[in-house]
Image (cartoon, helix red, strand yellow):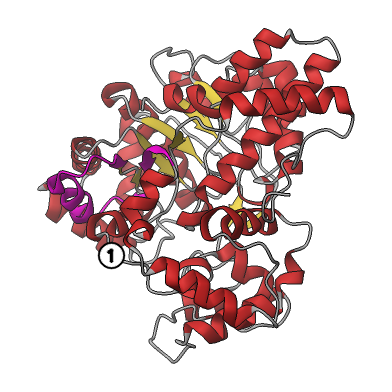
Amino acid sequence: MAGLIDPDLLFPGDERTRAVARNLYTEVKGLPIVSPHGHTEPRWYALDEPFPDPAQLLIVPDHYVFRMLFSQGVRLEDLGVPTLDGSPVETDGRTIWRRFCENYHLFRGTPTRLWFDYTLSNLFGVDELPSAGNSDRLYDRIGECLARPDYRPRALYERFNIEVISTTDGALDPLAWHAKIRDSGWKGRVVPAYRPDAVVDPDFEGFSANLDRLGEITGADTGSWSGYLDAHRARRAYFKEFGATSSDHGHATADTANLAKAEAAALFDKVRSGKADASERRLFRAQMLTEMAKMSLDDGLVLQIHPGSFRNHAPAVMAKFGRDKGFDIPTRTDYVTALKPLLDAVGLERDLTVILFTLDETSYARELAPLAGVYPALKLGPAWWFHDSPEGMRRFREMTTETAGFYNTVGFNDDTRAFPSIPARHDIARRVDCAFLARLVAEHRLREDEAYELARELAYGLAKKAYKL
């Protein structure tokens, strides 16, 4: 054992295949991390201040952690999750940490447990599982580490061997923290991604005011269809000035549309006036995915589509704590019909990259792999959110490789708000992929030299190429 992590974690059980997986992993475990999509705070890298305490670093911002505890009756307030109205929540980090440690057994068998074990062992040198009996001792140990200069954000970025990391930033974000990073002279590469949901989704809270603000900051007339599109072009160009290579779209469905200009303008007018019904609002979101794909042809930004999540499923939690509090639930998702208008418009373009994600695993072999296996513009994003797990990653490879191959996928991205979990997530993905490749070698479906080449591509090369990083 190496701390809490066995050297053969996630490798095959039979000796011959395990030996191949070990050798493949040895070749890729030290490769730099390309993190092309995530939700860490650019403020961390800009200010480079010490993280406040173990709870604020590892518990409070991580919905993978607090959603499990909430499911077992632990209140979010008792875990320090901030409320929108400022009503009281637990602020004592030691108390929050103790509640987490007392319930660590709840994470058995989950990817969160693997990520946390890895972080505790490799980052903080902890070799015992958290429990009620050792919570204070672990809290003090981690707290002492966080007080050291080598545990500040920039030092950890370098320690984690991160080559580049992309944050996800709203269309109205001034990118002030990114400017501060750029002007600081620090060599770390932190780039934004353009996330326009607040100004393309008529159901987003404050949508009309958001469009007003979009007009103010771009000087475009967001009261007209053409001016509204010009505002997006201006913001995308601004994001590119800070190194952005992608946009990201979290729509409820994968619906796309390709309306004639007059029809689109009329639809926009109705949406802008607040008079559009539910079907018209859905059509507008669909139209905007195609518009964004067309803009990507012009400016080169990679288009990421994250559909199929019923976001903020619990209205009471949304009202009290806001978005992204663990209540995004997977739904059935159609891709073949939904994407056809976009693909009819731009799907054959070789200079366009559209990365598809899914929470509906039933679509892997039936829809996603066949689509990505023929349309030049399409690539498959890795197993995401609920399927960002060893079994989910295995299923993804098993169900997509035969039709789409490896090179129509984009490697791995960690999609995390929990900064210390980044190396853990990438390490687990590398282990799973090495195990899958080793099985193909053992079954004589892949030459061993090909497996070594593929292991490097899956760990590093494909993400770097797909996201133009």
Looking at the image, which is closer to me, 141 or 372?
141
Is 163 inside the magenta-drawn segment?
Answer: yes
Of all residues shown, which one is farthest toward the left?
Answer: 219
Residue 106: where, in percent of width, then height?
75, 70
Residue 179: where, in percent of width, then height?
16, 49
Query: Which residue lies under the disc numbered 1?
Result: 49
The reply, left or right, for residue 215 in relation to residue 346 is left
Of all residues shown, which one is farthest toward the bottom?
Answer: 88
- Residue at x 78%, y 62% (from the top left corner): 108
- Residue at x 48%, y 77% (from the top left corner): 321
Label 1 neighbour load within 10 Å: few <14, some 14-19, many 20+: some
Looking at the image, which is closer to me, 246 or 122?
122
The reply, left or right, for residue 156 in relation to residue 462 is left
The quarter holding residue 447 reads top right
- Residue at x 36%, y 28% (from the top left corner): 469
Indicate the secondary structure of the residue bearing disc 1: loop
Residue 76: where, in percent of width, then height?
57, 80
Q: Is residue 421 visible?
A: yes
**Which residue type carries mark 1?**
Glu
Check the image and report above or below for 453 versus 141: above
Check the image and report above or below for 395 versus 455: below
Looking at the image, which is closer to me, 136 or 41?
136
Residue 7: where, in percent of width, then height?
71, 41
Is 284 inside the magenta-drawn segment?
Answer: no
